[in-house]
Amino acid sequence: MREHAEVQVRAGAEADLKALTDIYNHYVRETSITFDTTVFTPEQRRSWLHSHPEDGPHRLLVAQDVRFAGPDPSKHPADGILGYATSSPFRPKAAYSTSVEVSVYCAPQAAGGGIGTLLYKALFEALADEDVHRAYAGVALPNDASVRLHTRFGFRHVGTYGEVGRKFGRYWDVAWYEKRLD
C-alpha cells in the first residue's frame, strides 16, 4: 500500500454527492461489480446518501486527497474524492439489525492504490463501538482484487450464488463473505 499522508477519510457529505455518483456510475457502465444497469443522477442518489448518517451502524466514509479539499471538505465541492465505503442494512427485517452489508468503491484512477484498504480500516474502526455483530459483502465474480481485500480484513467465504445476476448479456456469480465484528 502506498503512503496516504495526503488522504483524509471522513464522513460523506452533501457536497460529495456528484463525485460519489460519478464513481458509482463508472462501475454501472463499465463493470459487473454492481448489478445496477442504468446510471444515476446525483438527485437519484440523494436518498442513498442520506441513509448513511455520520454515526450509527450505517456509515458512508469517503477518501479525499486533501490537496483538493477546501477548509471544510464536508461543505465544499468534493474535488479529489478517491473512493468511498459504506455499511448498509443487510436486510430490512428487524432481526437483521445487528448485521450490515459493506462495500467499497474506488475512483478508477485510485484503484489498486490502497484506498479500499484505507477506507475499510476506517469503516471497521467506526463500527467497533456499534451494536453490529456481522458484516457481509457480496462480490460479483471474477473480482480478485475484492476477494483479496475482504480476505485481508478477515472475511471468510460462506457461499456463492451461481449465475444470480445478468448484465452485459451474460450471467454472473456472486460470492458472499462474512466477518464477525463483536
Image: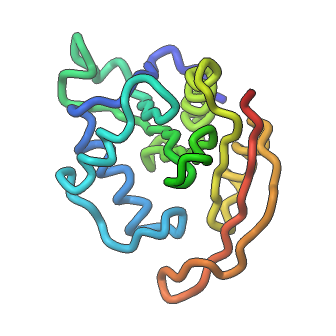
Number of dots carrying numbers: 0
Q: Can I make out residue 2 in this image?
A: no
Image quadrant in which you'd find residue 16 = top left
**Residue drawn at point x = 64 percent, y = 51 percent:** 137
* 50 over 10 or under it: above or below: below
Outermost front residue: 94
* 16 over 125 or under it: above or below: below
Left or right of 143 on screen, residue 94: left
Return the residue nearer the eye: 109 or 162.
Answer: 162
Return the residue nearer the eye: 179 or 63.
Answer: 179
**Residue drawn at point x = 35 percent, y = 41 percent:** 51
Q: Can I make out residue 1 in this image?
A: yes
**Residue drawn at point x = 61 percent, y = 27 percent:** 131
Picture coordinates of residue 7 (x, y %)?
Answer: 45, 21
* 123 over 163 or under it: above or below: above
Picture coordinates of residue 3 (x, y %)?
Answer: 59, 20
Return the residue nearer the eye: 48 or 116.
Answer: 48
Please state, as top left, top right, bottom left or bottom right, where the N terminus lies in the image. top right
* 92 over 31 or under it: above or below: above
